[in-house]
Structures are given as structure tokens and as C-alpha cells.
């Protein structure tokens, strides 16, 4: 897919590269899209399960009190980072991103493939809502969606879009480290969640801005 693009990917090429009978792909997955969907679904389920397990462990260790938002977000980001850093996994993540954002992928197909991811996202949203009791649920939902979008943009590719141009303006690494990206991403998302509820208040702050970024 990475070499030829999704449109240029043929089942016969996949079978040849895998040294497999092309009929097996048709038998097990139906067609090319069925095969790609299964790759995406398995990856999404793997990440969702890891996120769920880490969140459960964090809650168990918090003694019934809301955990720090930073700790919650690390439970969210770290499984993705660990998956991306495995050999050949980043290409799979790019395929997952294509399925999520491509206009030519039906909404029903997206919902089916990402069912587990959405379920686990709801669990994280519930916990984060406890961390920011002054922020209405609707705003928390929007901020969670913004966090998801930022995460995929920053961590979904080896070098984020625009990095080469922006990094040329100063003494910035030519190739960003995934760990650095994750740290800055968490700080960015924390800033979004702790933003004022009334965005018109600006620098005056508001109920949602009481928690410090360092939390």
C-alpha cells in the first residue's frame, strides 16, 4: 500500500509478496478491501485492548479518586506509540488513518472497523470528565475529538505534515523523535481540556481552566 498507494494495490500482488495462493485471500476475506479491513480491525482492537487494560490498572491504583489527566492521557497515547515503533506497523497505522478519514470509505464501514476503539474512547472520556468536573459533557466530547485528531496527525506518520518546513526555521531536529512528539502532544491536549469553558473569556480564564497543565 505504501509503495503503490491504495488505488494501485492488487490482491494478486499481495498474494505474490506473501507467497500465498490468491484464492485463499478471496476465500477468507472476499476481496482486497476485506483483507485490508481485517488488517485495520486487528490493529485497532489490539490498541483498544491495551488502552483499556492500562486505564483499568490506573483506576485500580488511584484509590477511588480521579487520576491525573496526564496519567490518563499516557494510558491513551503509549499503546499507539508502542505499536507505531514495531517493524512495519507504521504502514498499518497509515492504512488505519486512511480508513478513518477517507471520504470514499462508507461511514458504516468505519464504524464496524473502529467499534472497539470508539467503545474504549468512551471509557477514557468518562474518566477525563471526572478530572474536569467544571467542563460540560458536550465540550469534553468536542475536546476529546480534537485530541484524537491531533494524535493521529502527530503520531500517524514518521514525520508530521509540515515538519520539514517548520523545522528549517530554527535549530530543530530534521527527524522528530516519537517520544518527544508524544510528550508535546500530551501537553497540548492537556491545554485543550483545561481551556476556559467560555472561550470568549480568553485570558481571564474560567471554570475549566482551574487545573494546571502540570496535572
Image (cartoon, grey):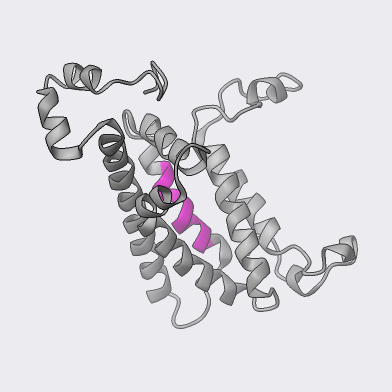
Compare residues 165 and 172 and report the one nearer the observer. Answer: 165
Q: Which residues are magenta?
A: 71-81
In this view, the residue in front, 38 or 103, is 103
The main secondary structure of the magenta stretch is helix
Determine whether 46 is above or below 121 in the image. above
Which image quarter: residue 133? bottom right
Residue 211 visible in the snapshot: yes
Q: Residue drawn at (82%, 71%), measured in percent from left and top?
A: 206
169 up-or-down from 140: above or below: above
> Residue 151 in magenta?
no
Extreme-bottom residue of the structure: 64
In the rendered view, tell whether residue 108 sits above or below residue 94. below
Q: Which quarter of the image is occupied by the N terminus? A: top left
Q: Residue at x 21, y 18 (%)?
A: 12
On the question of residue 61 being in view, the answer is: no
Q: Quadrant of residue 151?
A: top right
Q: Toward the viewer: 108 or 200?
A: 108
Residue 113 position, x and y percent, is: 35, 50
Residue 201 x, y percent position in the rendering? 89, 66
Task: State which quarter of the image contains the C terminus.
Answer: bottom right
Q: Residue at x 44, y 81 (%)?
A: 63
Give the side of residue 178 with respect to residue 47, left or right: right
Q: How many marks?
A: 0
Q: Position of residue 70 (x, y in %)?
A: 56, 60
Q: Position of residue 99 (x, y in %)?
A: 43, 40
In reply to whether residue 76 is colored magenta, the answer given is: yes
The residue located at (20%, 37%) in the rendering is 30
Amino acid at each position: 500500500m505504501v509503495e503503490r498507494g491504495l488505488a494501485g494495490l492488487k490482491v494478486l500482488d499481495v498474494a505474490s509478496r506473501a507467497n500465498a495462493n490468491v484464492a485463499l485471500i478471496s476465500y477468507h476475506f472476499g476481496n482486497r478491501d476485506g483483507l485490508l479491513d481485517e488488517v485495520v480491525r486487528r490493529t485497532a482492537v489490539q490498541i483498544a485492548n491495551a488502552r483499556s487494560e492500562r486505564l483499568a490498572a490506573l483506576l485500580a491504583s488511584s484509590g477511588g479518586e480521579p487520576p491525573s489527566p496526564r496519567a490518563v492521557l499516557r494510558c491513551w497515547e503509549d499503546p499507539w506509540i508502542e505499536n507505531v515503533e514495531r517493524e512495519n506497523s507504521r504502514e498499518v497505522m497509515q492504512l488505519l488513518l486512511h480508513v478513518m478519514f477517507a471520504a470514499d470509505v462508507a461511514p458504516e464501514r468505519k464504524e464496524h472497523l473502529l467499534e472497539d476503539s470508539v467503545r474504549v474512547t468512551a471509557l477514557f472520556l468518562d474518566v477525563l470528565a471526572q478530572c474536569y468536573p467544571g467542563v460540560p459533557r458536550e465540550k469534553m466530547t468536542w475536546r476529546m475529538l480534537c485530541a484524537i485528531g491531533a494524535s493521529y496527525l502527530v503520531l500517524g506518520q514518521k514525520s508530521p505534515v509540515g515538519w520539514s518546513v517548520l523545522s528549517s526555521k530554527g535549530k530543530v531536529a530534521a527527524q522528530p523523535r516519537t517520544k518527544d512528539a508524544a510528550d508535546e502532544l500530551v501537553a497540548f491536549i492537556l491545554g485543550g481540556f483545561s481551556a476556559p469553558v467560555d472561550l470568549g473569556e480568553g485570558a481571564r480564564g474560567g471554570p475549566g481552566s482551574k487545573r494546571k497543565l502540570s496535572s
